[in-house]
Image (cartoon, helix red, strand yellow):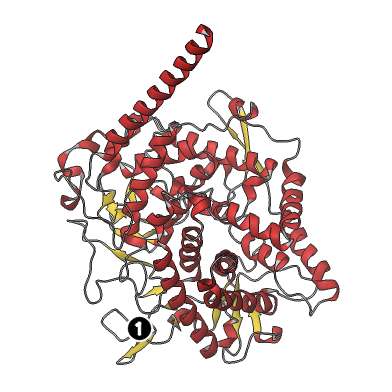
Amino acid sequence: MTFVFAVTWGLLAKSAAATAAAAETQRRYQNPSCCRFSKVFHDADWQDEVTRRLFKQRAIKAERRFFAEPGVAYDQETGMTFDGISLDPATGELNRGPPPAGPFGFSAASKEALHLSLLALALNPSLVGKDLAPLVYDEEEAMEILEKKVKTMEDFDKTEPGYGGFLPWFCTRGAIERGRVRQCRSLQDEASTLAPTNDFFNKVPGLDNGQLAWGTYAVARTLRRRATEDPKFNALAKRWEARLERMRTTAVPLFYAGRGTGAVRAVSKIVNTSRDAFNASDNAETMMVYPAFLDDAYEGELMVLFMDLLADWSAYPNNGLEERNKMWERKQIKLVARNYTTANGSAITVQEGFWFSSHEQWKLMVLPYLEIPLVNQVFTNSEYVRVLDAINRGIPGLFASSHAPPNVRCGRLGGYCNAVGVQEVASQVVYWDQSVTPYGAYPVMLVDQAAGLAWYNIMLSLPKMQTETGSVEASDVHGTAVAAVLTWDTKVTSVLAMLGGTGPLISSFLAADGHRELFEERVGKMYSEVFSGRLSSPQNIRAGKTSLPWPPGNLLPRHWESVDSAFPTCLCNTSSTAPPPRLRGNI
């Protein structure tokens, strides 16, 4: 009896201690209420689950002031995204008002894909966590946006059937003639039908639309499942299923380059946008851009997988099996293993990058790649190299394509840094290494959330990298200037990664639809051909532990904590913070 009592008392004491520790963590990280919360997490124990949860709550609440705010990230009337919005470089406040202020009047399928992914996850609270899902969108908000968005897409499809339900770069509120100049409508103009931007009148990009196709799949299948539980979802579910079916039936005539090629077009030129894309393979041509075809092992793979797993190949023998096999044969030679040599001379094997920019790992955020053990190990190695390279070079963050701060020039025209990454494991020349962006950490989050959040937070800690509207686009590596702009790519990718991406969600739908096995067969075989038996990994990963290096605190510049290192609108001098827009729940 004494022994039982002692054991019981010990367990109770341990439980009480854990509860007290969690309460202290909660008090510490929820107390500061200014928008520059990164400083509070500077020396956080990222392995602690409570700490990670509290950080994600604060980060998503902050980012919500962007992605859930109509007139900033999306249009209240059409439901469609704006590419982004600029900030006042002195105050960090949104540049609202008539052009050139206000949200950018254009957007693309890739931004719509991010929006749809967020909406799908918000409608799956049991998957992402009931404490986080309402911070994204509540059910009423999500349905309202999806209703407007599908109506806009339906209307565009009727007006421009040659796009087959896919999207060009577009004017969010339609286009307007101002004198002899055609421009995207602003918030001050009356909204009209979605319209292609001037440079995409008869063109449709395959890479962006591969992302859109899977975002549509996630939403359509989510609504269909919710409709079995609640009839209020029925009508909306049918409309999104129709959008998915439309894309499923037009993907091959629009994007496949023809019998025997195995080639998926990077950009398709539409001969006549008024002619329906269905069964009209002669109405689309290959646009001679570089690269002309999506045979890469990066983001372009999403369109290949959509076409292989879901598209209608009835115009080809045996449901296009020979053509589909050729797509993967063509891709196989583009998957290359490269070794990164560490300071002690050991090798880490990774997938060769184009530039090895984080942007190239987009597919990990969308589909269940990380459920395949070998593929998971390859990308864990890749993210290990990404953070190790930053530590070795003393860089306070990670590289991904983004707008440049004013003191950093990228390219002949300046302004956008795309050729960034890790030269040792890149196939192309990495030209720029003077700016970092918070979303550079999103693939790290996907393979090791503790390390990913640590790297994300160190970039938020750089001077003027946090605003009342969440994270800023990019900072120079010295912490002396920021790119005063907010965009979907550099903000919402991080939010999706915090939520685990749509991989687990889409995995369940692929299994239910009978496609999960083929997904694993295609992807698994491609990676096995290159990496099986030839994968050299760090010791802790070989031991089965996914633990990536965290950023040392001394990576930050000395002035990161100074008073003038924050925007005046983001100083920690208040006791309360205004709640995010339309947030109905308290956590």
Quarter of image, res 48: top left
**Residue 35 screen position, x and y as percent:** 24, 48
Three-letter code for the amino acid on which mark 1 is drawn: Gln
**Residue 488 screen position, x and y as percent:** 41, 61
Relative vertical location of residue 62 with respect to residue 144 in this rendering, above or below: above
Taking the view exactly as shown, the residue that stands out farthest to the right is: 318
Q: Which of the pair 121/317 is nearer the observer? A: 121
Residue 402 seen in this snapshot: no
Residue 500 seen in this snapshot: yes
**Residue 315 screen position, x and y as percent:** 79, 80
Q: Which residue is mark 1?
A: 183
Quarter of image, res 293: bottom right
Left or right position of 348 against 167 = right
- The residue drawn where x is 39% and y is 43% is 456
- The residue drawn where x is 39% and y is 33% is 394
Left or right position of 484 against 151 = left
Q: Which of the pair 50/34 is nearer the observer? A: 50
Taking the view exactly as shown, the residue that stands out farthest to the front is: 1
Left or right position of 164 against 18 = right
Q: Could you say whether the residue bearing mark 1 is in a helix, strand or loop? A: strand
Relative vertical location of residue 514 with respect to residue 245 in this rendering, above or below: above
Relative vertical location of residue 275 with respect to residue 518 in this rendering, above or below: below
- The residue drawn where x is 30% and y is 63% is 582
